[in-house]
Image (cartoon, rainbow, N blue to C red):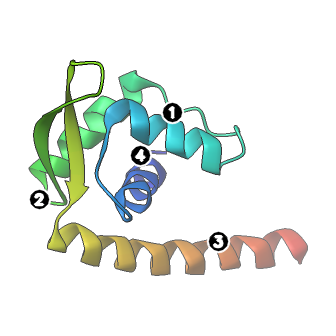
Amino acid sequence: MRGALDLLVLKTLAPAPLHGYGIAQRILITSREVLDVQQGSLDPALHRLERKGLLSSEWKELENGRMAKFYALTAFGQQQLADELEQWRNYSRAIGWVLEG
């Protein structure tokens, strides 16, 4: 599931930077509440993607005065997202052929 989570994170961050909780909530909402990503899975994924150079991060103050780490796609992350989306579409299509065959 790691590859799928990484792809979900990259896709979720494509429009704009978000903090960890925002990423988890956006995935939950856009998946129609099917994919509930827990912080225990999300945080290691964010750190891994940042180490790979796919994400950058910066601390920002929230409306309530608390600080949160916001993540954004790097140029490398944008290219990786495009590549992984194409691979995912091919993989998904192939699985569909097997299930329907």
| Circle 3: element type | helix
Instruction: Kindly report the distance in space between the C-alpha atoms of the residues bearing marks 1 and 3.
Output: 21 Å
Residue 72, picture quadrant:
bottom left
- Image coords of residue 73 (percent x, y): 23, 61
Contact flag, marks 1 and 3 (Cβ < 8 Å): no
**Circle 1: is it few (<14), some (14-19), or many (20+) Cα within 10 Å?**
some
45 on left or right of 59: right
Q: Is residue 56 above or below residue 84?
A: above
- Image coords of residue 10 (percent x, y): 36, 58
| Circle 2: element type | loop
- 17 vs 24, nearest the viewer: 17
Contact flag, marks 1 and 4 (Cβ < 8 Å): no
The residue carrying mark 3 is 92
Contact flag, marks 3 and 4 (Cβ < 8 Å): no
The residue carrying mark 1 is 37
**Circle 3: is it few (<14), some (14-19), or many (20+) Cα within 10 Å?**
few
Instruction: Kindly report the distance in space between the C-alpha atoms of the residues bearing marks 1 and 2.
Output: 22 Å
- Image coords of residue 3 (percent x, y): 41, 54
Residue 21 shows which numbered tag? none
The residue carrying mark 2 is 53
- Image coords of residue 95 (percent x, y): 71, 70
**Kind of residue at badge 3:** Ser
- 67 vs 75, nearest the viewer: 67
The residue carrying mark 4 is 2
| Circle 1: element type | loop
Which of disc 2 and disc 1 is earlier in sequence?
Answer: 1
**Kind of residue at badge 1:** Val
Which of disc 4 and disc 3 is earlier in sequence?
Answer: 4
Looking at the image, which residue sits at the far right? 101
Q: Is residue 67 above or below residue 69?
A: above
Instruction: Kindly report the distance in space between the C-alpha atoms of the residues bearing marks 2 and 4.
Output: 17 Å
Which of disc 3 and disc 1 is earlier in sequence?
Answer: 1
